[in-house]
Image: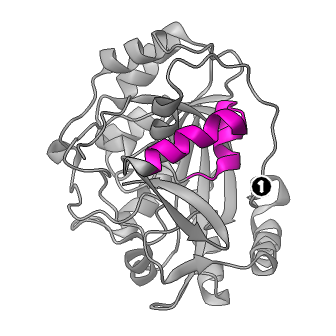
Amino acid sequence: MGKRKSRIIYGPILSRRLGRSLGVDVIRNPSSRKNCNFDCVYCQLGSVTDKIQSPEDAVGCVTCSEVVEGIRHYHRSIEDIDYITFSGTCEPTLNLWLGEMIDSIRDISDVPICVITNSSLVGRKDVRQNLAKADLVVATLVSGYEDSFRNINRPAPGIHLEEVIEGLAALSLLDGCRLSIEAMFVESNEFPGNSSDREISRLVEVLEYIDPDEVEVLTVTRPPAESSVHAVDEKRLKEIARYFDDKLGRNKVRLVLQGIKRGRSVLKHENIEEEVYDLILRRPCTNEQLIDSLDISRENLIPVIENMKYRGTIEVIRECNTSYYRVL
């Protein structure tokens, strides 16, 4: 079956961190379901075979006018959206028009803008200048050790942890945006995880140097790229958060646990199947997550899901005794 063309504007997604978020995907490369310069072992989109080494190598970059038109003509009211978020199937900073896109969105919307980045390119001044235009930057940092960084993030050649750390420190000094560091903790059957006392102590040293506005402590909640990877248990995650509280200040640290309940939006649907597909393409979802994010009744959702499974558009995968749908 041929690949369905996805929209660059999708959602809203109900996020543990950002509330109700309207997504923007800024690379549309039909030859790849994931356009990134990392191949993170925990990524919910699966593995990437051809990592993009630099923005200059990115194929299928969406233009500023496409993003603005997409938001302007999006068929739902976005009045109850908490953020417009650059994320999706790609690393947003690989598109060097990102800063111009943010400026242009501000001309048509007052909704705060967030960029979720893997931090790979923050060593570049042009990338930092683009990111600084956002209201919030959520940047990943999994370790203060190069070997752990490589085991978990599996970066493209030429990307080094020291440059990432220095870039994040430089970004934190820029005016305009808030910098939140996402500290993703994982365990693995194939390599040492990053939740040991040694790892935590070193990461705190690095975070003190970067001095972000916020640090998020979290673990895997959706099916990861590698089956050998699993979540850090909640007890250990809380221990890490308390240690971060003591070293970084309680006002800076946020423990992100699974589960979020928010009031639903009143949304007008034009094509439920397209909306479901666009959401699952960016992140595997359960029935409940689709119902809550898109304000779809179970009675309307189940026939759509069954039809998509029958036609081979999506598959069912399981993680921690929970069933998720993932695009094929």
Which quadrant is the C terminus positioned in?
bottom left
> Does the stretch in magenta take in 209?
no
Vertical placement of 18 versus 312: above or below? Answer: above
Residue under the point 74% across and 24% down:
265
Residue 213 appears in view: no
At label 1, counting other C-alpha atoms closer than 10 Å, the crowd grade (few under 14, some 14-19, many 20 or more) is few
Left or right: 80 as drawn, with respect to 152: right
Instruction: Pick whichever, 258 or 144, lies toward us.
Output: 258
Residue 200 appears in view: yes
Instruction: Pick whichever, 175 or 302, lies toward us.
Output: 302
Q: Which amino acid does label 1 sit on?
A: Gly
Vertical placement of 315 versus 155: above or below? Answer: above
> Does the stretch in magenta take in 301?
yes
- x and y, in percent, of residue 80 in the image: 72, 20
- The colour scheme of the drawn protein is one colour
- x and y, in percent, of residue 305 in the image: 54, 44
Element type where label 1 sits in the image: loop
- x and y, in percent, of residue 45 in the image: 43, 57
Residue under the point 62% across and 38% down:
301
**Chain part drawn in magenta:** 285-309
Left or right: 296 as drawn, with respect to 318: right
Residue under the point 34% across and 52% down:
121
Vertical placement of 126 versus 199: above or below? Answer: above
* Most common secondary structure along the magenta stretch: helix
Residue under the point 23% across and 44% down:
55
- x and y, in percent, of residue 84 in the image: 56, 28
The residue identified by callout 1 is 259
